[in-house]
Amino acid sequence: MAGSEMAQVPHHPPTYVTFNLKYLTLSGLWNPYNDYRKWFYNIYCGMIAFLVVIIRTLGYMSHAWSVHDDFVRLTLSGFLAFAFTCGCLKNINLLWRRSDINFIATTLQWETSLPCSKETALYRDEMVPQTIKLSKLFTIIWILDALFCEMFFYLECLDENRRTLNDVLIGYTCLRSFVQTWNFWILLVTDYLMFTVVTFTVLANDCLVMSLTFHISTQLKILNFRLRKSCRSYVDSAASEISENGKPNIFYCPQTDVGTVRSAANQELIYCIQHYQQIVRMVDVMQSVYGIILFPQLVSSVVMISLTGIHLFVTKTVSLSNPIPAGQTILALLSILFQLVAYCWGGNTIISESDLVSSATYKSNWYKADKEFQTNMLIFAAMTQNPLSLSAFGLFELSLPTLKNVLVKSYSAMALVKRANE
């Protein structure tokens, strides 16, 4: 009897952001255990997410102070110190707001609990896997980019004259007295591993934000699809929006049988309103979790884009005649831009899709429905006129126009410095 009851327990599907949560677990930021392993993981978290990050950040600050006469090295060390300081703040924020992140990850699949037509299920089964693949691809590309950038910061160590403790960052940390007797190559490998661990931990946060914004925008796409079909028969063709080869994905969804259930248009609208309310809740929670913490991120990005741009295009203290510093500066600039694009692109997808909700309500056959439906649709359309958005401290909206403004302001700063030099 117990065995049969166990067999009837529904399988809990993985969340849409399972890949990102595994990445966070590897980075020491997401404890998946509830047994004795929980305490071992907490020790791992303290070492990876805080001890190594703090030691590395203080090392860059110390290095920046020691090379303050070299503006290029000062800029690069300052850039990494800023980036890892923001990363440490995001680590604390993520651990503090874990329940909120878990709420968003769970609520992303709330829509699958609603009865739906076969067309809606097929549309979901096509859109959600695409979003998962996109977020995975973006994460992998970001990791590979970080690994490639790291290599440039260690190319100088190939020079025989630069194989001392002062030529690796670990020599500027509190570990100096402990490692000063080590072989240089052991020092180099240790330093590189610390750099990699800290970089991956910082990226884990950024990739999670990017993935969540992509999935929320996908939920808005599913909502808009249902709204457009809300006044039509479930047997109405949706071939123009669904792939012919659509197959159910691995995510459980109680699908409505079109042959036996014909939901009234008003009931379908109620489902859509409930879905939209859940999306609004997810956006509000994301805003409360990341709204403040993204402000120093954007400000530091503007400063570092301006400084690296000044080196490359104004003072030209970095040139291809000295390829290693040039490569380090260029890759640092590209890393900042890549991060900004990820944030602003993800935020812009939410704005653009939520802006289409009112349009989707109009594109339904609302004029064929009864007066109750038309009244509810009118109220819903009025409530969705203002698009949803994420912002940094309520000042900078995560959108493509914000990305453009950041680049414009950085260019203005470079132009101002150039005129001052002239």
Image (tube, rainbow, N blue to C red):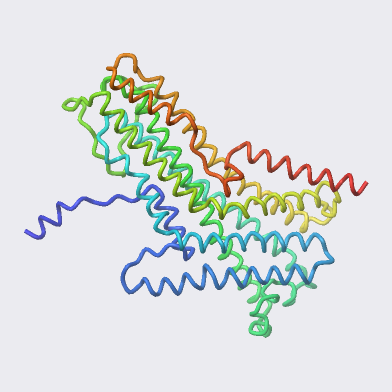
Residue occupying image coordinates x 65% and y 82%: 179
Residue occupying image coordinates x 80% and y 59%: 72
Q: In this picture, is 402 found above or below 265?
A: below
Task: Say left or right for 186 vs 275.
Answer: right
Locate residue 221, reporting x and y percent: 42, 33
Task: Say left or right for 226 vs 175.
Answer: left
Locate residue 192, reporting x and y percent: 62, 68
Q: Quadrant of residue 401?
A: top right
Q: Quadrant of residue 109?
A: top left
Task: Say left or right for 77 vs 232.
Answer: right
Locate residue 336, reporting x and y percent: 65, 50
Exactly how many numbered labels are in the figure? Answer: 0
Task: Say left or right for 137 vs 152.
Answer: left
Q: In this picture, is 129 found above or below 60?
A: above
Q: Quadrant of the N terminus?
A: bottom left
Q: Residue furthest top?
A: 368
Decide which of 355, 68 is in the foreground and name it: 355
Residue occupying image coordinates x 73% and y 57%: 328
Residue occupying image coordinates x 82% and y 61%: 71
Decide which of 107, 326 is in the foreground and name it: 107
Locate residue 171, reporting x and y percent: 70, 76
Q: Residue furthest right?
A: 422
Decide which of 416, 241 is in the foreground and name it: 416
